[in-house]
């Protein structure tokens, strides 16, 4: 099995090499068959990589521990789900997963664009294949995931690190990879345009969507990483400027810059060199990020493998990328000359330019600060480090400036804004910002950076609101529909623009959450049972430290009660779990009490069972949930920008009949979540209740310490039994259904230790996954419809002119020869 | 053309200088020397009062009763440094574990204000994963 896998990788390498050779030769000789065979080979690589992935997944599932990688990252007791996802649990598998995703993405991009950008396709295939060859080469000579033990192989694997056995850690890496890998596509098209010299704006149209899709994945990936850090690592924050985090942020900056500056090129024919440069830089940074975190070049206290061989290979690859791509940029400079010049600084293109500079500077700064220890050592021989405060000191003003530009950009006209339209445009946002500032002053908000941030949020919201309002009014007058239909129609007519504004709303929410950091409270105390401590408005009292065991792990749980204004508001259960085989690496189970105003975040990093004492870290995190919400809104906005127009067809009709449908749709959209909630909380009839009660008694543990379910507690006159049963009855009387009762018990107890059979750790958080799942489904819809959508104009053109594709291909070729 | 080039060049120069100066001055405040125990202890008085990160192995960890005051030694290649820390320590902070302390050195030992423990053997962050464990305290 392992050797078959390895041979598949070898053959993928060979096929890639063929795809490169055939495509280049085909493009140079203008031989359609050769180019087609190159494309065929390219698709074949995707098939081979799928087969290889299937083999490694099979090896994981069947527990083939003769393969080192399988033995290292899984074991027989691991749930099936984590066995499958162990595929990308380590470096070797990640590289393979990377190539797999790239081959799939690349094939999709080539398939969609094969007719429309026929002249570019051979080189797109070439560039992507070369990138694939690099990673395949890495696997073949250095990081072979199919490597077997030369001598005796272990009977069981070592198991995936408990920290990674977490739902977010399962979906975060693939999301991130998809974002990274997707950014290869714009690069490939950019390079193809540079190589062929077809540097009109058509290549941009091809890559805009792909950049947006990758950007979406990258953003969601970053968000998931933050949630994981917040919920699992237990230090009270979600972003620590770690090299690994920064690696994901770098291409995000440049991709964001590109998505903005591309508009300037489309509208005004400016920034053409700049856009090509951004595409190259973004791709380069995805590779550099991998290099930075993997090769040991940036020394971090985390166990990054130091691997000089890997560093050397990556360096060669990165230097080649830069030399070749910027070599082509130089060579094509005459073709990249701007068609226009900047007319005025009070113009939208100037705002975009400023936005680009700042984003690029952010990328540069983060790169510099991340690499600073390495750089300082190289230059002075002394290793100097900089911590998160240094990053924050710089990124705070940078972020606020970007936020300000988010508000200003849409208010400026293309080319030049006159004084009158400046006044006309800025009035509402400025008033909105002033209102927010006034309220803050009245409320006595002290933290001034956060205050500025809130005011700027008000400004941006003012801008966006005004844009939507004015657009909808104009459309309403033109089409004579109701305001909702006009609004939807407006978004449908300019999906990118208004989708973009929704993304900006997401950004505002993010910043709202960031501003909350200014009011964060963090307290570390040692508590004994009965002792309490005050943090802000909250008082935390430790009641007890208890030990439980569920067979898979031992759980030490701190039982605490939280008070606010002398009122008990709830109980929280921070814990430490010691998994079998990983006793020296206990996981910290954070207890979080969420609300939109603030989270109370409780960690119990250390405990003493004899003294019954626990050291507690108590963090009050204001507004933090708005960050997650912001990511959701950003994803939503991007999806709207990506949706094909047909989706909105119902709102584009001029007839007032459409008004009814739209309003109905809106109403149903608003009501739908409510309906879902109502459905899930349907009250239970008395007959059902008896059966349900019996079922739950078998699922919920008695708390007397007998470690048996309620219906099996043998203790006489058991107090724990009585309280648990009373609680169960109460929940059932309240009309809660099965899942809600379980949830309520977990909520009350603080962990799943209260259940006879623990819910699989990852899956019980599916609720949080829902928006992302929805996004994924929507994405599939996007891809499918986008394909149909993109192929339609071709078909229409063919039908209209009656020219068959072969003839038009020849015509195209002949015309090209005229140049 | 040349006039424009001069303007662009000058703007670029001014901006670059401004950022350079800013970067340099903020770096001066924020940068910490990163040293191994043996490097520091070779000439300890040179490091008194300087912002410092010391990398070494912990041993002889003691905690004052009913408090979060820790006192321990960190060592590497025969050199030993006495250190103190108040606050919550990472899970992996145990005898013989690898730690990096942030703080300042004085004649009576190293006073740590932050601590990062190296994660044991098997933690391998993902390629491009956004969130590795962070160095701000407990992980």
Image (spheres, coloured by chain):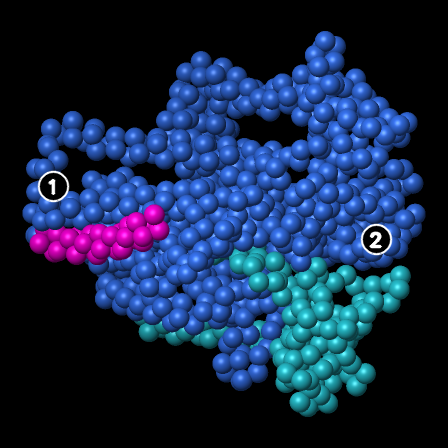
Chain colours: A blue, B cyan
Q: Nearer the viewer, mark 2 or mark 1?
A: 2
Q: Which residue shows up at 10% across the image and 51% down it?
A: A30
Total numbered labels placed on residues in the image:
2
Q: Which residue shows up at 39% across the image and 47% down it?
A: A56
Q: Is residue A288 left or right of residue A135?
A: right
Q: Please rate how many residues cluster around mark 2, counting C-alpha atoms within 10 Å: few if below 14, some from 14 to 19, many from 20.
A: few
Magenta region, main secondary structure = helix
Residue A225 locus on image (x, y percent) = 56, 50
A23 above or below A377?
above
Q: Is residue A283 visible?
A: no
Is A4 part of what is drawn in magenta? yes
Q: Please rate how many residues cluster around mark 1, counting C-alpha atoms within 10 Å: few if below 14, some from 14 to 19, many from 20.
A: some
B97 above or below A349?
below
Q: Is residue A50 visible?
A: yes
The segment highlighted magenta reads: A1-30
Cα distance between the residues tagged 2 and 1: 79 Å
A330 above or below A260?
below
Q: Which residue shows up at 90% across the image and 49% down it?
A: A529
Give the SS element for disc 2.
Answer: loop
> Disc number at residue A809?
1
> Disc number at residue A609?
2
């Amino acid at each position: 099995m392992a050797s078959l896998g390895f041979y598949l990788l070898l053959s993928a390498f060979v096929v890639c090499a063929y795809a490169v050779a055939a495509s280049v030769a085909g493009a140079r000789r203008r031989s359609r068959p050769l180019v087609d065979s190159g494309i065929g080979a390219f698709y074949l690589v995707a098939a081979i990589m799928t087969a290889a992935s299937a083999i490694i997944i099979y090896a994981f599932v069947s527990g083939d521990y003769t393969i080192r990688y399988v033995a290292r990252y899984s074991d027989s007791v691991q749930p099936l789900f984590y066995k499958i996802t162990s595929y990308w649990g380590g470096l070797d598998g990640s590289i393979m997963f990377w190539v797999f995703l790239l081959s799939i993405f690349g094939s999709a991009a080539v398939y969609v664009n094969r007719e429309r950008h026929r002249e570019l396709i051979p080189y797109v295939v070439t560039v992507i294949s070369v990138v694939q060859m690099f990673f395949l080469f890495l696997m073949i000579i250095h990081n072979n995931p199919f490597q077997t033990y030369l001598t005796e192989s272990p009977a069981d694997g070592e198991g995936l690190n408990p920290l990674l056995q977490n739902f977010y850690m399962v979906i975060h890496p693939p999301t991130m990879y998809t974002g990274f890998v997707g950014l290869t596509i714009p690069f490939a098209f950019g390079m193809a345009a540079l190589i062929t010299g077809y540097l009109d704006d058509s290549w941009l149209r091809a890559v805009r969507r792909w950049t947006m899709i990758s950007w979406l994945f990258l953003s969601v990936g970053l968000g998931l990483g933050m949630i994981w850090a917040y919920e699992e690592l237990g230090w009270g924050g979600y972003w620590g400027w770690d090299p690994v985090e920064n690696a994901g942020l770098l291409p995000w900056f440049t991709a964001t810059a590109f998505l903005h500056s591309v508009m300037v090129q489309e509208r005004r024919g400016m920034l053409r060199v700049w856009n090509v440069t951004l595409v190259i830089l973004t791709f380069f940074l995805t590779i550099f990020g991998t290099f930075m975190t993997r090769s040991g070049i940036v020394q971090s206290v985390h166990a990054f493998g130091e691997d000089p061989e890997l560093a050397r290979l990556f360096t060669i690859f990165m230097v080649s990328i830069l030399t070749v791509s910027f070599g082509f940029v130089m060579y094509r400079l005459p073709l990249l000359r701007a068609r226009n010049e900047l007319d005025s600084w009070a113009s939208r293109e100037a705002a975009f330019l400023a936005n680009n500079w700042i984003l690029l500077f952010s990328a540069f700064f983060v790169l510099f600060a991340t690499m600073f220890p390495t750089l300082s050592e190289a230059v002075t021989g002394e290793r100097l480090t900089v911590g998160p405060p240094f990053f924050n000191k710089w990124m705070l003003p940078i972020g606020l400036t970007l936020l300000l530009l988010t508000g200003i950009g849409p208010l400026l006209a293309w080319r030049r804004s006159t004084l009158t339209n400046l006044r006309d445009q800025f009035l509402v946002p400025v008033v909105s910002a002033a209102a927010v500032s006034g309220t803050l002053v009245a409320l006595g908000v002290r933290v001034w950076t956060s205050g500025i941030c809130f005011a700027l949020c008000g400004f941006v919201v003012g801008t966006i609101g005004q844009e939507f309002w004015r657009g909808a009014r104009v459309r309403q007058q033109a089409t004579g529909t109701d305001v909702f239909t006009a609004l939807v129609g407006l978004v449908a007519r300019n999906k990118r623009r208004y989708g973009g504004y929704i993304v900006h709303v997401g950004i505002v929410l993010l910043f709202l959450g960031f501003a909350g950091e200014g009011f964060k409270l963090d307290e570390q105390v040692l508590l004994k049972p009965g002792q309490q401590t005050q943090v802000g408005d909250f008082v935390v009292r430790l009641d007890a430290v208890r030990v439980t065991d569920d067979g898979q792990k031992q759980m030490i749980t701190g039982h605490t009660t939280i008070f606010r204004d002398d009122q008990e508001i709830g109980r929280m259960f921070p814990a430490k779990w010691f998994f079998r085989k990983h006793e020296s690496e206990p996981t910290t189970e954070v207890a979080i009490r969420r609300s939109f105003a603030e989270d109370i975040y409780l960690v119990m990093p250390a405990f003493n069972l004899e003294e019954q004492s626990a050291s507690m870290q108590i963090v009050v995190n204001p507004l933090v949930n708005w960050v997650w919400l912001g990511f959701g809104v950003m994803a939503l906005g991007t999806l709207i920008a990506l949706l094909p127009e047909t989706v909105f067809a119902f709102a584009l009709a001029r007839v007032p009949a459409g008004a009814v449908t739209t309003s109905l749709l809106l109403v149903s959209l608003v009501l739908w979540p409510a309906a879902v909630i109502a459905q899930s909380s349907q009250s239970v009839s008395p007959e059902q209740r008896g059966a349900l009660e019996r079922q739950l008694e078998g699922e919920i543990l008695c708390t007397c310490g007998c470690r048996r379910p309620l219906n099996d507690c043998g203790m006489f006159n058991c107090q724990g039994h009585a309280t648990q049963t009373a609680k169960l009855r109460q929940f059932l009387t309240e009309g809660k259904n099965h899942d809600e009762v379980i949830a309520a018990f977990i909520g009350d107890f603080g962990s799943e230790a209260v259940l006879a059979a623990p819910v699989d750790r990852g899956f019980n958080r599916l609720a949080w996954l829902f928006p992302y799942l929805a996004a994924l489904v929507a994405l599939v819809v996007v891809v499918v419809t986008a394909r149909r959508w993109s192929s339609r104009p071709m078909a229409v053109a063919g039908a209209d002119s009656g020219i068959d594709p072969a003839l038009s291909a020849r015509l195209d070729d002949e015309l090209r020869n005229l140049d | 053309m040349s006039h424009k080039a001069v303007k662009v060049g000058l703007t670029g120069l001014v901006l670059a200088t401004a950022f350079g100066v800013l970067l340099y001055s903020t770096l001066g405040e924020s940068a910490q020397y990163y040293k191994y125990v043996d490097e520091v202890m070779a000439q300890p008085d040179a490091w008194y009062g300087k912002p410092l990160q010391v990398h070494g192995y912990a041993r002889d960890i003691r905690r004052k009763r009913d408090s979060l005051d820790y006192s321990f030694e960190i060592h590497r290649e025969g050199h030993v440094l006495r250190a103190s820390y108040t606050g919550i320590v990472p899970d992996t902070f145990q005898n013989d574990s690898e730690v990096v302390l942030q703080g300042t050195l004085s004649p009576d030992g190293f006073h740590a204000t932050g601590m990062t423990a190296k994660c044991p053997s098997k933690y391998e962050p993902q390629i491009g994963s956004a969130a590795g464990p962070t160095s701000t305290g407990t992980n």
